[in-house]
Amino acid sequence: MDRRRIIRAIREVAKKLGRAPSRGEFAERTGISKYFVCKWFRGWTEAVQTAGLEPSALNAKIEDGALLEEWGRVVRESGGMLPRHEFRKRAKYNPLTLAKRFGGWTAVAQAFRKFARGKGEWADVVAMLPEYVRSVGRGACFVTSEEEDPEREKRKADSSASGCGRPQPEGRNDNPGQRAGVKPARHAHTGSRQDAGGTKKSWAGVGRRRKWYAARGDRATYGNPTPCRWLRHEPVNEQGVVLLFGMLAKELGYVIETVGTGFPDCEAKRQVGPGRWQQVRIEFEYESKNFREHGHRADGCDVIVCWRHNWKECPKEMEVVELAAEKLEMGG
């Protein structure tokens, strides 16, 4: 695969399309991967210009307003907000583009509220959006900030009146000190208490266990700690999966050829016999079900590398590498 062959292939595809192809169209029609293009050119735009063509407008950056207008149009026609895989079927823009631009798919609704403020033509769409934040399992509704929750004060008052929402049965007291007729003295700065004999004890494990602490919006969020010396926390997003796979590639039996942002994300080789290797196409996902939600074609990829495998309907021919299940020592 040399420079002249790539230029010739670009011109042939452009002749069929009647315009310069996008990088994805070129790879799909010729089978020439972006690895070889980047080997001879600094980027796709330079390759197209070298072929004597004007780069396709499909590669131009889409303005925020255009993305939000398309999101609003789909919400209006659908009568409400849609999950990403449904939005992709009805919109002309990839939902992944909106998620990256506005800080996540659940944040698009809030970005649209700000965009539509003072614009009467979008009043009907704004009226379809939920009015307050409410956590649901690990995720959240497509909502505005917690400060705009109209029922927040009422819930707080009800919670205080009922003892944090958990009224105790009559005659029941979970505090061991109070059951003995002694009110423990808690020290706010030391996190300790004193029993009847004046002995200081730790608060760890005393009373009901708290499920979660409130997250701070101005701080980074980490995964669970790991014993690994080179990676202190488990991945919490797709970028973490890419990094971890790069660290584990040798132990997993892969040699990485190239990594990019298009589909599929990675090209690699792995040994299939004595002195024999084959190329495989890899797509990185934080959870395997994201492959379906992103609208990827199953025939365009050989292996899904993810942190957690939770796609029950995954095609049998699709291989999944679940990094969370790999018990590998990485310099721990």
Image: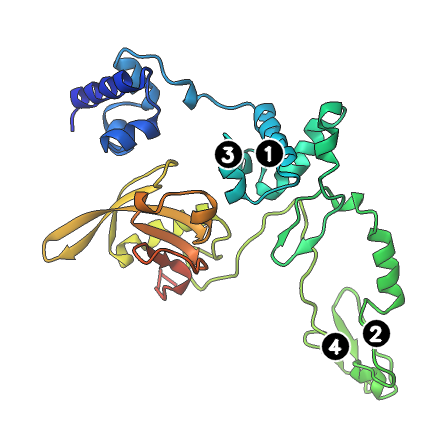
Q: Give the CA separation, mark 4 to mark 2.
A: 15 Å
Q: Which residue is mark 4?
A: 207
- Position of 5 with respect to 162 (left or right) is left
Badges 3 and 1: C-beta atoms under 8 Å apart?
no
Q: Which residue is mark 3?
A: 97
Residue type at tag 4: Gly
Local secondary structure at mark 4: loop
Residue type at tag 2: Pro
Bin the neighbour count of mark 1 within 10 Å (Cα to Cα): few under 14, some 14-19, many 20 and up: many
Q: Position of residue 240 (x, y in %)?
A: 45, 49
Q: Give the CA separation, mark 1 to mark 2.
A: 45 Å
Bin the neighbour count of mark 2 within 10 Å (Cα to Cα): few under 14, some 14-19, many 20 and up: few
Q: Position of residue 273 (x, y in %)?
A: 13, 58
Which label sits on residue 74?
A: 1
Residue type at tag 3: Thr
The image quadrant that residue 313 belongs to is bottom left
